[in-house]
Image (tube, rainbow, N blue to C red):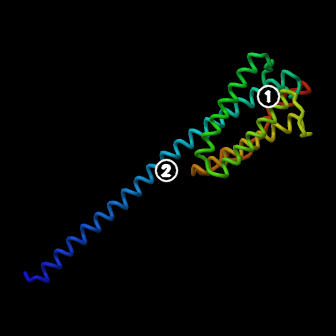
Amino acid sequence: MDLIGQLATLLGVALGAVLSMATTMILEKARWRREQSVRWDERRLTAYAEYAHAVKILAHCYRRIAVAKGIAASGAVPLEPTDEVLAEVAEAEVQRSALAETVWLLGDVKTNTAAVRLNHCLWHLEWLARELPTREQGGWDQAYEDFRQARHRFLELARTGLGVRGTRVAEPVPWPPPWKGDLSQGTRR
């Protein structure tokens, strides 16, 4: 083989090795990014779910206290605001606050904004249940509906941020359900 043929072969082998190495590096980097994405998505999912659950627990406690005080209509078992109950609720609020920090560290801007709005709605329920003065004129029912909408918005944005397609339910479901009837007047259907 002449020198030019040997150089061409050597150059081809070297070029093939460089291209193979570059391709491997690109594929490894893409694999690493996918693994990181899955890792953070799992953590985001856990953070969103735990935070949403903590918020729901607190809202339920505030509703039960409001029912016990006659602020909210029935629909939840009354919970007398004893010192022990209030201490448990305060501990649940500390837990919610810690979970919110994780949401803010891992969440996207829209979901974090929805979490802040949800916190405000939750605190409004707390103030109403504790009978603290507020500027809002809508009362418990309006505050609770605002809370439900804010929670729905948070969950909707969390799902979008995680790439979960679809919606929570296929169509609007009325609340209260028709089987419940109007319990404030003592009638049932």
Secondary element type, mark 2 = helix
Query: 17 and 159: which one is in front?
Result: 17
Looking at the rendered image, the quarter that the C terminus falls into is top right
The residue that mark 1 highlights is 63
- Residue drawn at x 20%, y 75% is 11
The amino acid at mark 2 is: Ser
Residue 30 is situated, as x and y percent measured from the top left of the image, at 41, 57
Residue 42 is situated, as x and y percent measured from the top left of the image, at 52, 43
Q: Are marks 1 and 2 in contact (CB under 8 Å)?
A: no
- Residue drawn at x 32%, y 60% is 24
Left or right: residue 115 compared with residue 29: right
Query: 133 and 12: which one is in front?
Result: 133
| Tag of residue 37 | 2
Residue 72 sits above or below residue 149 on the image: above
Looking at the rendered image, the quarter that the N terminus falls into is bottom left
**First-in-chain label (1 vs 2):** 2
Within 10 angstroms of label 2, few (less than 14), some, or many (20 or more) residues?
few
Within 10 angstroms of label 1, few (less than 14), some, or many (20 or more) residues?
many
Secondary element type, mark 1 = helix
Residue 17 sits above or below residue 154 on the image: below
Mark 1 vs mark 2, foreground winner is 2
The amino acid at mark 1 is: Arg
Residue 61 sits above or below residue 158 on the image: above
Quarter holding residue 103: top right
| Tag of residue 20 | none
Q: Tell me how far mark 1 sits from mark 2, CA to CA.
A: 38 Å
